[in-house]
Amino acid sequence: MPFVELDTNLPAGRVPTGLEKRLCAATAAILGKPEDRVSVTVRPGLAMAVSGSAEPCAQLLVSSIGVVGTAEDNRGHSSRFFEFLTKELQLGQDRCVVPWQIGKKGTVMTFL
């Protein structure tokens, strides 16, 4: 059962309506899991900084048994989550972090 937690310093009013449902569907598609087994939490309005800056940012934590694999697999997952987040939240890739085999700028640290 994948658990996904999205933390952001964006105010609740800037988080698109229904984001949690779209993130649930995207997670199921990205990880190849049934949507009815995905759990999503979205927490807006947090005090956050990424790379030393408190400009608008987001952090996505993904926990799931059996889907965190090789660096190559994780790079593919990270890239798809980054694409989703940057589009939905209108943030640059340098303002989103996916700390699951640390992901940044649409890839994982192994490849940076």
Image (cartoon, rainbow, N blue to C red):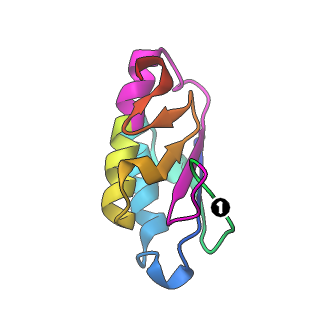
Residue type, label 1: Met
Quick one: which residue is furthest to the bottom in this view? 13
Question: Is residue 70 visible in the rendered structure shown here?
Answer: yes
What is the x, y in percent for residue 77?
Answer: 40, 33
Whether residue 71 sits left or right of residue 46 in the image: it is left
Give me the residue at 39% from left, 55% from top.
85
Front-most of residues 39 and 111: 111
Question: Is residue 29 visible in the rendered structure shown here?
Answer: no
Residue placed under numbered mark 1 in the picture:
48
* Magenta residue check for 59: yes
Magenta highlight range: 52-78
Whether residue 38 sits left or right of residue 47 in the image: it is left
Say if 40 sits above or below 2 in the image: below
Give me the residue at 60% from left, 71% from top.
44
Give me the residue at 59% from left, 68% from top.
9
Dot 1 alpha-carbon crowd within 10 angstroms: few under 14, some 14 to 19, many 20 or more: some
* Magenta residue check for 85: no
What is the x, y in percent for residue 75?
Answer: 40, 26
Give me the residue at 36% from left, 38% from top.
106
Say if 104 sits above or below 25 in the image: above
Say if 36 sits above or below 65 in the image: below
- Give the position of the N terminus as an image quadrant: top right
Q: Quarter-wise, where is residue 72 in the image?
A: top left
Q: Quarter-wise, where is residue 45 in the image?
A: bottom right
Quick one: which residue is furthest to the front in this view? 52
What is the x, y in percent for residue 110?
Answer: 47, 18
What is the x, y in percent for residue 4?
Answer: 58, 50
